[in-house]
Each structure stands twice: as structure tokens, then as C-alpha cells.
Image (spheres, rainbow, N blue to C red):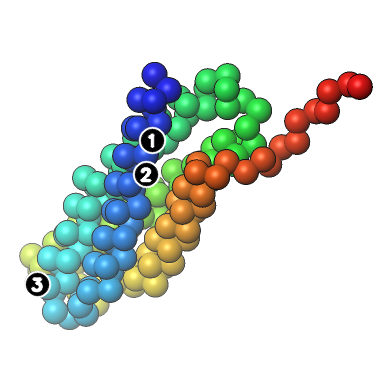
């Protein structure tokens, strides 16, 4: 069971970091909202990456991580608790800073393409989205570092002499 959870956690992390990298690349290619057809196409692709790659990878990583930390072997491992804390940050920021805005902007750009929304209202948060993705990518990299090197963050009690 332990190896399966480690495998699932690793596969989720690969997908999660890949999704964030893809979203950063797409953010770098977003045209001006004035070119509504191209803008809606890119934002639709970003919404799809956020929905079908980012979110499932985030869920898999968090679920496998939580099930792993439930094992007794990790209860005294400071690095595992640090990963739990940063995992909570990833979960919240993933929904609030990535998933929600990406889906909403994809929806709004499709509405603007159909003529129901003013295109001038689009593209307001590109810098915030980019910043959020960079912070989350840094946190995910930090989690990989914790998982590989497993630094001792909590001192174990010294045995009585």
C-alpha cells in the first residue's frame, strides 16, 4: 500500500507541476482581449488545462499525501508535516487562485465572443494569475525537495542515559 500511495502521489505531482508549467506558457501567449477570437481560444484552452489536468492532479496528490501521512511511519517526520502544511496552501490557492479564475475567464471570453459580454472587461488579472502560478510552482518544488531529501525538521527526544 505504501508504494502505491507513493506512486500515486508522485504521478499527481508530475501532472500538477506540468499543468502549472503549461498554464504559464499559455499565459505568456495570451493575446489582447481586443483579438477576441484568439483570446477566447487561449482562455478556453487554459480553462480546459485547469479543469482536466490541474484539478485532478491536485486532488490525486493531496489524497495520496493525506493517506500516506496517516501511516504511523510518518507521524514523527517533520518533513511530512511540512508537506501537509504546504499541501493545504496548494489546495486553497489551487481553487481560489487558479481553478476558479481560469474557468471564469474562459466562460467570460466565450460570452464575449458570442457578443454577450464587453471584451474590455477581459484580461484584468493576468499578472495575478501568473504570480499565483509561480508561487504554487515554487511550493510544489519545495514539496519535491522535502520528499526526496526528507530533512529532519523536528528533533526527536534524546534517549535517557
Look at 45% across and 51% down and name the residue there.
Answer: 140
Look at 55% across and 45% down and name the residue there.
Answer: 149
Q: Give above or below for 124 relative to 13.
A: below
Label at residue 18: none
Pointer 1: residues within 10 angstroms few (<14), some, or many (20+)?
A: many
Q: Which residue is mark 2?
A: 13
Residue 111 visible from this viewpoint: no
Query: What's the distance in space between the residues labelled 1 and 3, CA to CA?
Result: 38 Å
Pointer 2: residues within 10 angstroms few (<14), some, or many (20+)?
A: many
- Find residue 8 and report its image quarter: top left
Looking at the rendered image, the quarter that the N terminus falls into is top left
Label at residue 9: 1
Look at 39% across and 25% down and name the residue there.
Answer: 3
Outermost residue to the right: 161
Which callout, 1 or 3, points to the residue nearer the camera? Answer: 1
Q: Give above or below for 112 relative to 9.
A: below
Element under disc 3: helix
Label at residue 37: 3
Look at 63% across and 32% down and name the residue there.
Answer: 77
Name the one closer to the observer, 144 or 97. Answer: 144
- Find residue 2 and report its image quarter: top left
Where residue 22 appears, as percent x and y from the top left, is 26, 60
Query: What's the distance in space between the residues labelled 1 and 2, CA to CA?
Result: 6 Å
Pointer 2 or 3: first along the chain: 2
Amino acid at each position: 500500500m505504501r508504494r502505491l500511495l507513493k506512486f500515486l502521489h508522485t504521478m499527481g505531482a508530475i501532472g500538477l507541476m506540468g499543468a502549472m508549467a503549461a498554464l504559464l506558457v499559455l499565459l505568456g501567449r495570451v493575446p489582447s482581449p481586443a483579438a477576441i477570437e484568439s483570446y477566447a481560444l487561449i482562455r478556453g484552452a487554459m480553462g480546459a488545462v485547469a479543469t482536466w489536468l490541474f484539478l485532478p492532479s491536485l486532488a490525486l496528490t493531496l489524497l495520496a499525501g493525506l493517506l500516506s501521512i496517516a501511516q504511523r511511519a510518518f507521524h514523527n517526520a517533520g518533513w511530512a508535516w511540512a508537506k501537509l502544511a504546504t499541501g493545504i496552501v496548494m489546495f486553497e490557492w489551487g481553487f481560489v487562485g487558479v481553478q476558479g479564475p481560469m474557468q471564469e475567464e474562459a466562460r467570460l471570453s466565450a460570452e464575449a465572443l458570442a457578443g454577450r459580454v464587453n471584451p474590455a472587461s477581459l484580461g484584468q488579472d493576468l499578472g495575478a494569475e501568473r504570480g499565483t502560478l509561480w508561487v504554487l510552482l515554487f511550493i510544489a518544488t519545495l514539496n519535491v525537495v522535502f520528499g526526496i531529501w526528507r530533512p529532519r525538521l523536528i528533533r526527536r527526544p534524546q534517549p535517557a542515559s
